Amino acid sequence: MPAPDETDPAVIRNFSIIAHIDHGKSTLADRMLQLTGVVEERQMRAQYLDRMDIERERGITIKSQAVRLPWEGPDGTSFVLNLIDTPGHVDFSYEVSRSLAACEGAVLLVDAAQGIEAQTLANLYLALEADLHIIPVLNKIDLPAAQPDKYAAELAGIIGCEPSEVLRVSGKTGEGVRELLDKIVETVPAPTGDPDGPARALIFDSVYDTYRGVVTYIRVIDGHLSRRDKSLMMSTGAAHDTLEVGVISPEPKPANGLGVGEVGYLITGVKDVRQARVGDTVTSASRPAPESLGGYEHPKPMVFSGLYPLDGDDYPELRDALDKLRLNDAALVYEPETSLALGFGFRCGFLGLLHMEIVRERLEREFGLSLISTAPNVVYRVEMESGDAHVVTNPSEFPEGKVGTIYEPIVKATVLSPSDHIGAIMELCQGRRGVLLGMDYLSEDRIEIRYTLPLAEIIFDFFDQLKSRTRGYASLDYEPSGEQEADLVKVDILLQGESVDAFSQIVHKDKSREYGLMMTSKLKELIPRQQYEVPIQAAVGARIIARENIRAIRKDVLAKCYGGDISRKRKLLEKQKEGKKRMKTIGRVDVPQEAFVAALSTGTAKK
Ligand SMILES: Nc1nc2c(ncn2[C@@H]2O[C@H](COP(=O)(O)OP(=O)(O)OP(=O)(O)O)[C@@H](O)[C@H]2O)c(=O)[nH]1
């Protein structure tokens, strides 16, 4: 028997808004909250759903990943809409796919002054894969620069509908938002599921909360998830006490349980997001489902980088900070690492570049650390002639000996741009070992170009280059696409014959000399002269491919002291000693830490 507070699936509509960054997703969500009366006008703050903001402002304990909105349809029927938030970046495409799997429909939102962008398309493909009903919508029609007719035709062409079926709204003025909500109740299918079967709910987000432990966001597919039963996570097989279930509207409201099609949150005794991962299925421990919902994937780090405290004494703080961050981030991996040049630190694995930036920024901002990060690299698989296989996440650990085959990860990249930049885009992709997959005109002056590219070639400055070559007009999206054999070598940078681990890099054979020349000349500028000549070399195995010399100089701090003032002399010697503490000694060469930092921070290893 259904619990009294359960909602009839026939009146539930679960949907997401998918959009390119800045096309107005949050603003539209705000208008929806307001129009449905969930947030009163006077309480309305811009971007109500923006969770970081909420957290910062009020220290609220639950993020609004999914909000329940009541809506009366045109014929007077009361509906329950669940708006499910999706992360907006390629690094998190698995999370996006799980959020979409919790929905039956998606609003495809496009800025009427910009048209479709790469991220719009990537998210649209994910929505189509999840079999969602798509509602095409142009936003910002209040803008003088809006070209709704042109972009309605573009959108219609892509999803295969009539331009007249594309809705037009303004999140800013609220125009058309009522019609959009009506369209959602009218066209998005109601959820279906087996109300009497064992409970199965999909986890589409999981966040750590200081006060409540892990809060898990779920969509019930079958059965009924009750507050009174223990919850069982199907990928780990672990049962946990159910402390609270409920819905968010827009503050959390506890309920007795959730039924088919309902979206809400679940709080168990789980203390770490790894125990309640996105994509996992929750069932009830007293009557477990025989099979999970499927589609669960373990997060896989794609990009690695070393993180070191600027001040070596901060190492324990960095370790504690990473341990804390991990509670909230199931995809972050790290292990201790020691570097000759940088001291004690951690080798960290991330989903992508943005994930890496977010982690670094949080460590610096929330934990007050100053960090150095080494140039990011991808994961290589190396098969030796002897048959041994290695997975290399750190260039300095590239195996010695006779290498057979090296495999590198590749991505399928989609670039959207005004068509006058085709040449520049193709030149860039070609220069990065790209293989053209195809090209389509979206309208007469906008193109979509698809390439296969090595991930390593994008993680440095590809996006910046793309933006500058297209005057900011091109947008990029990519997804992992397996691996390929590649002719790669490890380049070591040697200071007086000794390899400096932080600068070792795995690069394509054709680019090894370029990397060697760049690093040696950069270090020549940064390393102060020593009392003897110091060679800086770049080497592939035993072969030197580039060389610079730091000329000898005798730096006599006492030279300026011509008088016999012994105390002044002592002071200068003391000062020199102090400076030496910040030096790292590589072989016999003293290198100030700043030199490494400077070389690494501008150290985008490829041009
Ligand atoms: N003129 C106008 N501006 C809008 C409208 N909707 C959003 N904006 C503006 O567009 C910018 C981006 O809007 P957001 O709602 O933050 O966009 P978003 O897609 O949520 O962006 P991210 O959260 O960064 O992905 C903001 O400056 C909004 O004020 C609209 O209908 N008309």
Image (spheres, helix red, strand yellow):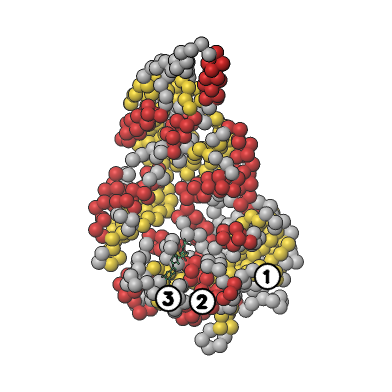
Q: Quadrant of the C terminus?
A: top left
Q: Residues within 10 Å of mark 1 (few under 14, many from 20)?
A: few
> Splitting the image into four quadrants, where does ligand 1 fall?
bottom left
Q: Nearer the viewer, residue 353 or 392?
A: 353
The answer to whether residue 39 is left or right of residue 303 is right
Q: Residue at x 61, y 64 (%)?
A: 218
Q: Which residue is mark 1?
A: 253
**Labels 1 and 2: the sequence-earlier one:** 2
Query: Residue, x 69% and y 76% (percent of image)?
Result: 5
Say if mark 1 contacts mark 3, CB within 8 Å.
no
Residue sitting nearer the eye, 545 or 384: 545
Gap between marks 3 and 2 measured at Cα: 22 Å
List x then y, in percent, for residue 72.
56, 83
Q: Is residue 317 above or below residue 403?
A: below
Q: Nearer the viewer, residue 412 or 386?
A: 412
Q: Secondary structure at mark 2?
A: loop
Tag of residue 86: none
Using the numbered discs, state the Cα–Cα distance from disc 1 to disc 2 in whole angstroms.
Answer: 26 Å
Circle 3 residues within 10 Å: few <14, some 14–19, many ≥20? many
The 10 Å Cα crowd at callout 2, few under 14, some 14 to 19, many 20 or more, is some
Which residue is at a point 64% across and 41% down the rendered structure image?
320
**Residue projecting furthest to the bottom:** 75
Image coordinates of residue 559 in percent, x first then y, are 44, 15
Q: Earlier in the sequence, mark 3 or mark 2?
A: 3
Residue 387 can be seen, yes or no: no
Q: Left of 225 or right of it: where is 524?
A: left
Nearer the observer, disc 1 or disc 2?
Answer: 1
Q: Dot 3 lies on which element?
A: loop
Where does label 2 land, which residue?
A: 189
